[in-house]
Image: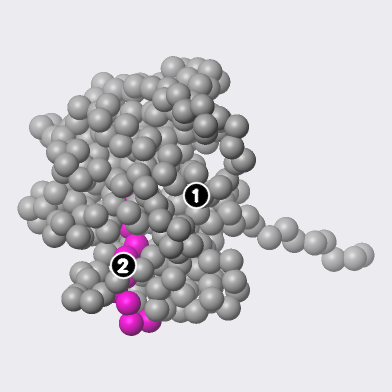
Amino acid sequence: MSEDTIGVVTVTRGRPRLLRRAMDSVYAQDFDGLIEHVIVVDHEDAETVAAVTAAPTRPGLRVTVHQEPRPQAERNEPPGDKRRVYPRLSRLFNTGVRLSSADWIAFLDDDNEYEPHHLSSLLECARRNGVRVAHSGRTMWYADGAPYLDEAWHTVTDPAEAARIYDVMCDKGVRVRGTNILLDRADPRGPGDAFRTSSTMRAQDPVSLVDQSVWLVSRDLLLRLPIPETFTAAEHEANTAPDDKLLATLQDNGVPMVSTRQPTVRYYLGGVSNRITRPQTVPAAG
């Protein structure tokens, strides 16, 4: 049995059905050490707390739930505003890291799922390479479970720009053309290389793309280098999310990281970073 422990931090609000699916995928992990699933609820949500409490558990899995009250100024804000959502997500992720007592931290968005070997493959990769940060790749899905095969980058709304970035990412081996596989990557940045998110990158830029749900990071490192909780107007314009801020922080501090090159997360579209839904087919006139 592994002596390492892994904490999985999930931030959620008002989506108990999706949350239970995410929790089931943590339950199904083949990792043979202790898993601590920390559910951080954004403000009060009795239905979500009840769903967590009713979820099955097993030896080697500990589930805790924490309701984090919103400041008064954030309680009646319009939904979906990234300028408000992203800073709060960073704050809630950091809260989950502090609440955990595990050696390593992984994250799982409440609308995503892990493949059964996700955590074990990440930890094995980190240990084999002697690093404190590892990440995986993912497969891309519409919310209804259909594979996302569109030749368009999922965080960009302009069709021409979405097609351009998709082609760039295929050329770089990040998107695997003709499949729903996306292999997240963090290329080293050379002198003078600006950090560019995948939503704004050019063909000559290093790839800077590690989704929140594919990270595995030493908890001690995350306590020293937490996810930044403030975002500039330029960062919002570039669709800079908490995972981008974490990646930039780790790189700026010279932290080495490796990838398993395995797509072990099922990433479902339709969240705040992309808002993509499956096109509805119109029956032919008969």
Residue at 60%, 41% in the rendered image: 79
Residue at 14%, 38% in the rendered image: 220
Answer yes or no: is residue 41 visible: yes
* Label 1: which secondary element: helix
For the residues labelled 2 and 1, say whether their Cβ atoms are less than 8 Å apart: no
Residue at 45%, 58% in the rendered image: 233
Give neighbour class at mark 2: few <14, some 14-19, many 20+ (Cα, 10 Å): some
Residue 83 numbered tag: 1
Q: Look at the image and say whether residue 212 sits in the magenta stretch.
A: yes
Where in the figure is residue 10, as x and y percent of width and height?
39, 35
Residue 286: which quarter of the image? bottom right
Residue 195 numbered tag: 2
Where in the figure is residue 132, as x and y percent of width and height?
14, 49
230 with respect to 219 (left or right): right
Please tell me which of labels 2 and 1 falls first in the chain: 1
Residue found at the very far left of the displayed protein: 130
Q: Look at the image and say whether residue 50 sits in the magenta stretch.
A: no
Instruction: State the residue in front, 143 or 94.
Output: 94
What is the tally of numbered marks visible in this picture? 2
* Label 2: which secondary element: loop
Amino acid beneath label 2? Phe
- Mark 2 and mark 1: span between their CA atoms? 19 Å
10 with respect to 134 (left or right): right
Numbered range of the magenta stretch:
203-214
